[in-house]
Image (cartoon, rainbow, N blue to C red):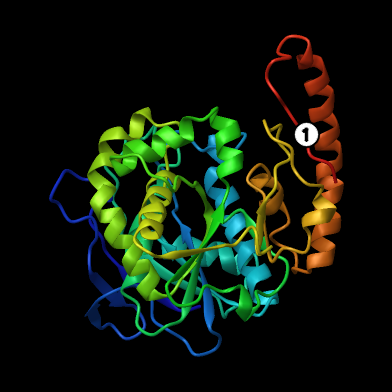
Amino acid sequence: MTLTSRTSEPIVQSAGQELYGETRRDFENGSVSHGPVVENSSRTRLQFVALLIVDRESEVFPNLRRASDAGAVYLGCAALLAKSADAAGHDIMFVTNDAGTVMRAFARLQVPETVRIEERGFVSSLPLSAPHRAAHHKLDLLRDLAGAEGDRIHIVIDLDTVVLRPLRHDELPGANEIGAYDITGMMLSESAGRSVDDLRRVAGRSSAHSRWFGGEMLAASPIGFAELSVHLAAMQDRYAAERADLYHSGDEAPVSAALNAFVEQGGLIRDLGQQRSIVRWWTAVRSFAQPRLTDVLDRAVLHLPADKEFLSSVAGQPFDPARFVRAYRRYARPKLFLRRLKRLGRLGASASMPSHVASL
């Protein structure tokens, strides 16, 4: 596995301070350079890029049963993602703060040697109790991608995803486009409308284009990431000031606000959900209805935020999409059955609160 290293400055700072560092050291040849962590390869037109923070400090890990399991679970999810991307024929790179830990875990779980690992320093001034604390470093990653050379498409992807099929070239964003996953309907339902107010507060104004985009998949060329980074930089101080009072604390609020500003200035969003490149699918009870699992298995990427432990548990096996789906059905069936029983028990006490359990 290829290993390089980089340092950075804190991600959330006061007005006027730089968010990102620039020094990188190549462990293979000992050289020091300045620039983004991304170096292009000609193997394919696209590369998946995943943030993998080995987090020994944060106190809150959303959608995990036990915070004490977070390290092992996220490493397992990353290994499964790596195997699934490799099986689909796509390059993938993990950007981490602890390459040694990642390499040992990947070796134990037999992750292919073609997977690339970049080590980069991350420093956060967020409180340890902040939800999605490590995910905020995705904003650093977007800045890094803005500095990449060439026109290769980089797809920033969450760890709790699996790649079920190759992405086609016609699914990738074109010139003046950024590929993003519009989940506005889900967020409006979950937040009872507060997500719109979050966007207004982060942007500092109301907008005719108030869409919410999921953080699990974001695709662009370096030019697209550079344009997005300009908008993010203009909003970083407002987000830092408002973060604790927002409905959703994490990378999604500032990135969504920046994407809306990008559209207002003539940019185009290619909706990765509408074109069936990705789906977010929950085994947890939600306030909105979801399609059956069977109906979304044609997506290239399946995001399973409520099932990180399951993803990690199968990471040691060779990846085959059909075998993975069979195993996931076996795991999800009893879980969904119990969710339905609990939902029926709650209906009398909270009939005014809509709740839905997905079907296989």
Mark 1, secondary structure of its residue:
loop
Which residue reaches farthest left?
16
Residue shown at 87% from the left, 48% from the top? 330
Question: The residue under label 1 is which amino acid type?
Answer: Val
| For residue 24, side relative to residue 347 (left or right) | left
Q: How many marks?
A: 1
Residue at 30% across, 46% down:
124
Pick the residue in front: 313 or 184: 184
Q: Position of residue 271 (x, y in %)?
A: 57, 60
Kindly tell me whether residue 136 is visible in this rendering: yes
Which residue occupies 33% across, 70% down? 146
Where is mark 1, residue-wise? 357
Residue 108 located left or right of residue 359 = left
Instruction: State the image coordinates of residue 115 (x, y, percent, origin top left).
Output: 55, 75
Q: Quadrant of residue 331?
A: top right
**In this rendering, does residue 158 appear at all?**
no
Q: Residue furthest top?
A: 349
